[in-house]
Image: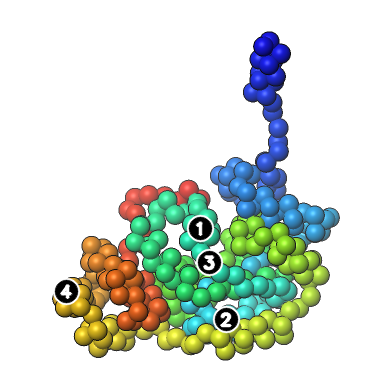
Amino acid sequence: MRKEKEIIQQFLNFESNDGIAEVPLYSTKNNKKQSLYAIDPYYREGFENASVVFGEDLEDISLRLSAMIFKPDAIVGRKVNETIAFLIEKGFTPIAFKTFSYNRNIIREDWRYQYNIATRNRMRAVDCLLQTSPSLIVFFITTIKQHTNACEEMTSLKGHSDPKYRTPDDLRSRLKSINPLLNYIHTCDEPADLYRSLGLYFNEEERKPLLKDIKMRKDATAHLNNAVLELYNTYEEIQFNYDETVSTLRSKLEKFSADQQKHLKEIFENPMSISQKKWELMYHILVVQSPNILSKWEINILLTSSVKISIDNKKAIIN
């Protein structure tokens, strides 16, 4: 019995760094991110794989590497080629890429440290939007400016998700996104976020070939253009226009039940001012009760254009 107690006490006193990942200073300037990512399994897997593949080039590649995620709306909205051309003009060279699909869990893990301020309705809208069709992640290499890294450079070019906070020169302004959620693109703010994304989106068998392509730093523009063309040929082009989508809904009202018609007429009596209570009713009718009357993209446009984004007076865990 005494021996068993000694073994238990040794176990309780055991200290180990196993499961604690290195988060180099060059990968993030955010102290809170350094602490959280050190025990984040997605960051740990992505960074450890990169450390092995990149070897002594790890820091140099980390500072020169960036990634852009083209969400489903960018593909059907035909915004990928325009964005790639813009980034090439700014000195970013595509060197690797891969499609992937969001699911409910990946969405929540991708914004784990920001979703504490997301409204429940926003989460519902994003679930519908990002699971409509595949996304595309593209990795770019570039020369770095003094005192910064490629991830920060790319993020600074992207612009705010909310149109009212953008400048005319921001990429999202050029792409003419119509609301804060239908914004086409997502970037990794810092190298640490890029490695976490690699660990989240892909398993180890998928990550390693990507990392090897990245290490080679070869221009993949031609191959990327072919991949984008294939996506365009697979997924129908969509025009994002809220007013036209509201008109389409009104033209199809007779296909809904009498009770649903009544509610939808009330909801869209003033399409530019839909309360969140009415939004929840709209979601229930269009997504839960009658999901096949409008197209998925028509539903996405209606949901994202009127949803409340953030809980008032709360700050994200990581900004």
The quarter of the image holding the N terminus is: top right
* Crowd tier of the residue under label 4, counting other residues whose Cα lies within 10 Å: few below 14, some 14–19, many 20 or above: few
User: What is the crowding at mark 3: few (fewer than 14 residues within 10 Å), some, or many (at least 20)?
Assistant: many
Provide residue 250's location: percent of width, then percent of height: 23, 85
Earlier sequence position, callout 3 versus callout 4: 3
Q: Amino acid at mark 2?
A: Val
Identity of the residue drawn at 62% across and 80% down: 84
**Structural distance between the alpha carbons of marks 4 and 1:** 34 Å
Residue under pointer 3: 102
Q: CB of mark 3 within 8 Å of CB of mark 4?
A: no
112 or 315, which is in the foreground? 112
Residue 84 falls left or right of residue 303 = right
**Residue where numbered disc 4 is placed:** 259
From this viewpoint, is residue 10 visible?
Answer: yes
Q: Residue at x 61, y 62 (%)?
A: 201
Which label sits in the foreground, 3 or 4? 4
Label 2 residue SS: helix
Residue at x 67% of width, y 60% of height:
203
User: Secondary structure beneath disc 4?
Assistant: helix
Q: Secondary structure at mark 1?
A: helix
The amino acid on which the numbered mark 3 sits, given as a three-letter code, is: Tyr
Residue 105, labelled with which disc? 1
- Of labels 2 and 4, earlier in sequence is 2
Name the image quarter holding residue 200.
bottom right
Residue at image mark 2: 80
Q: Which of the two discs, 1 and 2, sits closer to the camera?
A: 1
Looking at the rendered structure, the kind of residue marked 4 is Asp
Foreground tag (2 vs 3): 3
Residue contact at pointers 2 and 3, CB within 8 angstroms = no
Q: Is residue 14 above or below residue 118?
A: above
